[in-house]
Amino acid sequence: MSTDLRLLVLALIAFYTKHFLADFLLQTEWMARGKEQARDWQAPLSAHAGCHAVLTVGIILWFNASLWWLGPVDFLVHAAIDRSKGLILRGAGVSQGSTMWWSIFGIDQTMHHLTHLLYSVMIVLAASAVTLTR
C-alpha cells in the first residue's frame, strides 16, 4: 500500500471515529433537540459544532499542524449542514422516524462524510507537498 493511500485511510478512520464520537456519543439531548428548534438554537448548535471542531483540531494536529484552520472550518461547515437539516425537516413538517426523515438524515450524514473525505485528501496533499519540497 502506498504511503499516500495509507495516510488517506488513516485520516478517514480518524475522521469517521471523530464523527461517531461527536454526533452520537458526545451529543447531548439538549444539543440534538435544541439545534433544530425554531428559536434559541444557536447555543446547542454551537456546542455541538464546537465538539466537532475541537476533535478535528486534534486530528489535524496529529497529522499536519499547518492545517489547524480546518478546525474552525469544520465548525462552520458542520453547523451549516446541521442547521440546514433542521430547517428542511421543520419546513417540510417531517416527523422523526418517517421515511422522509431517514432520507434527510442520510443526506446529512453523507454531507458530513464527504466533508471528512475532503479534509483527508487535504492532509494527503499537504503531506505530498512537504515531500516534494524536501
Image (tube, grey):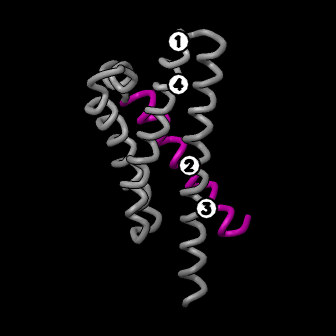
Q: Is residue 126 positioned above or below 29 on the image? A: below
Q: CA distance from mark 1 to mark 3?
A: 37 Å
Amino acid carrying label 2: it is: Thr
Quarter that holds the N terminus = bottom right
**Residue 37 drawn at (x, y percent):** 36, 20
Rendered image: mark on residue 121: 3
Q: Which residue is mark 1?
A: 93
The stretch of residues the image draws in magenta is: 1-26
**Residue 99 drawn at (x, y percent):** 66, 12
Q: Is residue 127 magenta?
A: no
Q: CA distance from mark 2 to mark 4?
A: 20 Å
For marks 4 and 3, the one nearer the N-term is: 4
Label 4's element?
helix
Q: Is residue 24 magenta?
A: yes
Label 2's element?
helix
**Residue 64 drawn at (x, y percent):** 45, 68
Q: Please tell me whether mark 2 or mark 4 is closer to you in this view.
A: 4
Q: Which residue is mark 4?
A: 88
Residue at the spot 62% in from the left edge and 28% down from the top edge: 106
Q: CA distance from mark 4 to mark 1?
A: 8 Å
